Image (cartoon, helix red, strand yellow):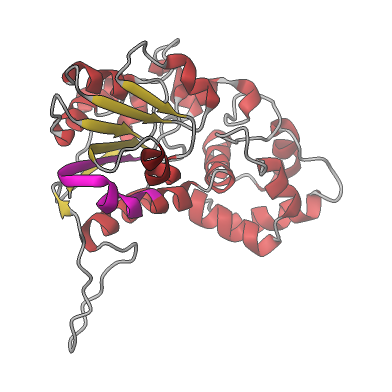
Amino acid sequence: MAAEKHISDAGKAADGGNDYHVPVLLKECLDGLAIRPDGIYVDCTFGGGGHSRAILQQLGPAGKLVAFDQDADAKRNLPDDKRVLFVPHNFRHLQRFLRLHRIEKVDGVLADLGVSSHQFDEADRGFSIRFDADLDMRMDQRGELKASDILASYTESKLHKLFEQYGEVTNAKTLARTIVEQRGKVAMNTISQFKAAVQGVVKGNPNKYFAQVFQALRIEVNDELGALKEMLQQLPQVLQPGGRAVIITFHSLEDRLVKNFFKNGTFEQEEEHPFENRKTVSELKVITKKPVLPSNAEMKRNPRARSAKLRIAER
């Protein structure tokens, strides 16, 4: 699992200073979508709009692009294009908002599940270990749960599981116990306060360690895996026959969910049974038997791409 989905703070400078977000695996995404000029396409994670702009270049006047993004900042990047419909909500509500806009079926769905450089660069959002700010981490500022709420209220066992599963933190149990012990003595509302409170149990490189811890908190705050599951389950209903789903993941938990759902129509690994056929049938056809990975040239040009995996399926 990558320490942060798109880019570690240590590698941020190599990303190109002012870009809101550099689209990862751009050509591979466009090829995977097999875009029809008159088709309807969904970008579930609009962000800086890099993937969306490339899709629009291949759409004709009759084509349409539906762009989802729960982060209010993303709206600033919208192109002045009447073919674009912006939905300021999480992609877990994919089918609901398509129907609200009288769209029953689409020809392709794209989701780039990484966090944008912009979100890491905005100090007051609390995503990055490079700044001191409130421990927020909400992608949707309308949400109620903040990272500081998790530190203040979760039980030791729940914190242990969170850091172990979502961050692969080596001493997750010790960290959880330390947080519970310390929160009654010191404040842990800001990044610097939290770092100071747990400094004594940090293992290895502090930047890498806190990046893994922050990843776990961010996934929990935004219910990222729950949202991904809900979106994937809607794909068979919203895609036209022959329509494509193109998903870019940045850590093993996401990739496993996408892989299993594309292949089996479930989120669990199918197990062979010697006496009975329990295999579920997916409504999607896997196009990529193995994930598409970025080239060495792209990783050198854009370090955030290094942990990206692209999977494609067809309705």
- Considering depth in this image, is 155 or 31 the residue closer to the camera? 31
Q: Nearer the viewer, residue 304 or 313?
A: 313
Q: Is residue 171 visible?
A: no
Q: In the picture provided, is 243 more to the left or to the right than 104?
A: left
Quarter-of-image position of residue 269: bottom left
Q: Is residue 22 above or below residue 232?
A: above
Q: Which residues are magenta?
A: 231-249
Decide whether residue 72 is among the magenta residues. Answer: no
Residue 276: horizontal and vertical position, in percent? Answer: 19, 86
Q: Quadrant of residue 222?
A: top right
Residue at the limit of the structure toward the front, as seen here: 102
175 vs 66, left or right, is right
For image coordinates 25% across by 74% down, the residue present is: 271
Asked whether 242 falls inside the magenta stretch, the response is yes
Please tell me how many numbered marks the rendered image carries: 0
Q: Going by the picture, which residue comes out furthest to the right? A: 185
Q: Is residue 110 visible?
A: yes
Q: Residue at x 76, y 55 (%)?
A: 180
Q: Residue at x 56, y 53 (%)?
A: 163
Query: Residue 18 placed where, x, y %?
Result: 45, 10
| Residue 189 percent location from the top left of the image | 76, 37
